[in-house]
Amino acid sequence: MGWFIKFIDSSLGKKLIMALTGLFLSLFLIEHLVGNLLLLKNDDGAAFTAYAEFLASPNNIIARVLEIGLFLVFIYHIVNGFRLWRYNKKATLVRYHTNNSSANSSFFSRFMTWSGSITFIFLVIHLRTFFFPYRFGDPANTMYEGVKEAFSNPIYSGFYIVAMIFLAFHLVHGVQSAFQTLGLRHNKYTPFIKKFGVFFAIVICAGFALIPIYFLLTGGN
């Protein structure tokens, strides 16, 4: 077991864990987006309400297990990201005067800590708005009605859309870096990986941003 602790504490181990947890969270974003797009159906929220009730059902053991796993992965992704940031910061201070490493890195890679931090703040507010009241509280309305009310507020919708922009910044570099860490570093794969990272970030974040825009423009009607 000691070798495993040493490995995950190494630079390679930290990067590998970031890649695996990041890809897992990316898969969650796909599933979450597909479910949330049900909000756009013209059925007074029936499809989304059924989806939300299915996920929240205490009899849905698989959902509960995945929920706990998702929480643990997300926390570890944050902790490991902070550890990797500290390691890279120390290494950069050593290399900076010899090869100006920050000038040779992309904007998205240098912005990862900020985009990740802002995304985390958004997630805390988002969970406080939707997840905790409807999972552990006793709301008077359905989650669809709660979403409709929240996104009818221009301030919250504006905050949500801006947060999606920062998430897109995070995903552009995160997806590219994850695949490269897992071994796809060959030059012939690099252009595709970069394009895929941009494509994934735009599709996912534009899809989420479309939801508050829809409610702002239509009021859900």
Image (tube, rainbow, N blue to C red):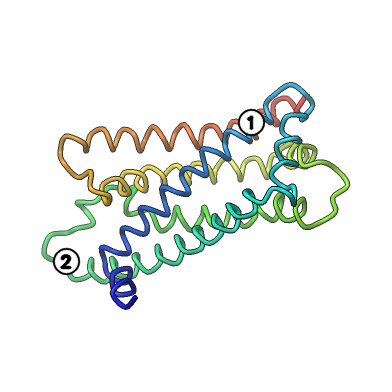
Amino acid at the residue labelled 1: Ile
**Secondary-structure class at tag 1:** helix
Screen quadrant of the N terminus: bottom left
Residue at x 23%, y 66% (from the top left corner): 92
Q: Which residue reaches farthest right?
A: 140
Q: Which residue is mark 2?
A: 95
Residue 132's quadrant in the figure?
bottom right
Residue at x 34%, y 65% (from the top left corner): 84
User: Is 16 or 154 nearer to us in this picture?
Assistant: 16
Residue at x 53%, y 62% (from the top left corner): 72
Above or below for 74 versus 183: below
Is mark 2 in CB contact (under 8 Å) with mark 1?
A: no
Residue 126 seen by the camera: no
As measured in the structure, the alpha-carbon distance from the residue carrying label 2 to the one carrying label 1 is: 45 Å
Q: Is 32 left or right of 1, judged from the image as shown?
A: right
Amino acid at the residue labelled 2: Arg
Q: In x, y percent, where is residue 142?
A: 82, 41
Residue at x 34%, y 74% (from the top left corner): 5
Q: Which residue is mark 1?
A: 213
Q: Is 197 left or right of 48, judged from the image as shown?
A: left
Above or below for 176 versus 195: below
